Amino acid sequence: MGALHSGHLSLVEHSMMHCDATIVSIFVNPTQFNEASDLVKYPKPIKKDKALLKKAGLDIIYVPGTDQIYPPGLDTNVEFDLAGLDRKLEGAFRPGHFAGVVQVVKRLLDIVQPDKLFMGQKDFQQFTIIGQMIRELKLPVELVVVPIKREKDGLAMSSRNVRLTSQFRKSALVLYKCLQDAKMKLNSVEINKIKTSALTAIQNAGLKPEYFDLVDGYTLDPIKNTDESDYIVALTAAWAGDVRLIDNEIIKMI
């Protein structure tokens, strides 16, 4: 979606290491925004993005217009069994968001026809849903998930970070701290207490939390005990002023 940073460039680097050719698409997809105002505010520094990709040695930059992605008369809707993955966490606060994500990713895959698709861990639910789409539709592409790229102080890199005030930039560090605390306390503190403590800390830092949950990494279902899953992820979303931030940490994986 443009407004590239080092996190995006890490995806490019991984692709260039493992593939013969690398393509980056830049398309601010209107169908995945719940609020029209958020679409308007979303940064679109296309010249800067192109310069960063050129410096990185990218092979192809694909910057389509809306009419190319959603041409009149072409049905671009995608239907498959989401197994409820779209209704949890982000889905509960952003209804219809993942329908837009699935629609645009499927369209881009149809156009580019890549062998591998590189996505970042930061949008954990997003890549989980795309993985489900690939399996259900039997698409000939391998999904590769690249770890979260963070600032030196731990804040997950995001295109939205440029909109943070200096105060909220400092306050936002509470998200990563709470994720790290959850990982440290996983085997010694009750799950509900971990979640309650995190939500309180986020609120006390001046942010407005939407959720902080520990879930099974495959189903995204909340867990009550650590022995319920071999793959546990802590995920959070919160508003820092008018900027919505998300983050996650894989805290158990066997």
Image (cartoon, rainbow, N blue to C red):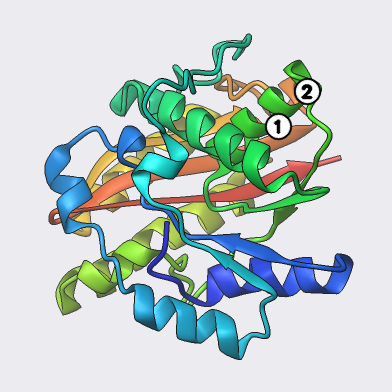
Q: Quadrant of residue 7?
A: bottom right
In front here: 40 or 61?
61
- Amino acid type, label 2: Arg
Q: Residue at x 68, y 40 (%)?
A: 187
- Amino acid type, label 1: Gly
Q: CA distance from mark 2 to mark 1?
A: 6 Å
Q: Is residue 159 left or right of residue 154?
A: left
Q: Residue at x 46, y 21 (%)?
A: 88
Q: Is residue 107 above or below residue 145?
A: above
Q: Is residue 154 left or right of residue 252?
A: left
The kind of secondary structure element at disc 2 is helix
Q: Is residue 21 left or right of residue 45?
A: right
Residue behind mark 1? 131
Q: Position of residue 186 (x, y in %)?
A: 63, 42
Q: Is residue 55 above or below residue 10?
A: below
| Whether residue 89 can be seen here | no
Q: Which mark is residue 135?
A: 2
Q: Are marks 2 and 1 in contact (CB under 8 Å)?
A: yes
In front here: 232 or 99?
99
The kind of secondary structure element at disc 1 is helix
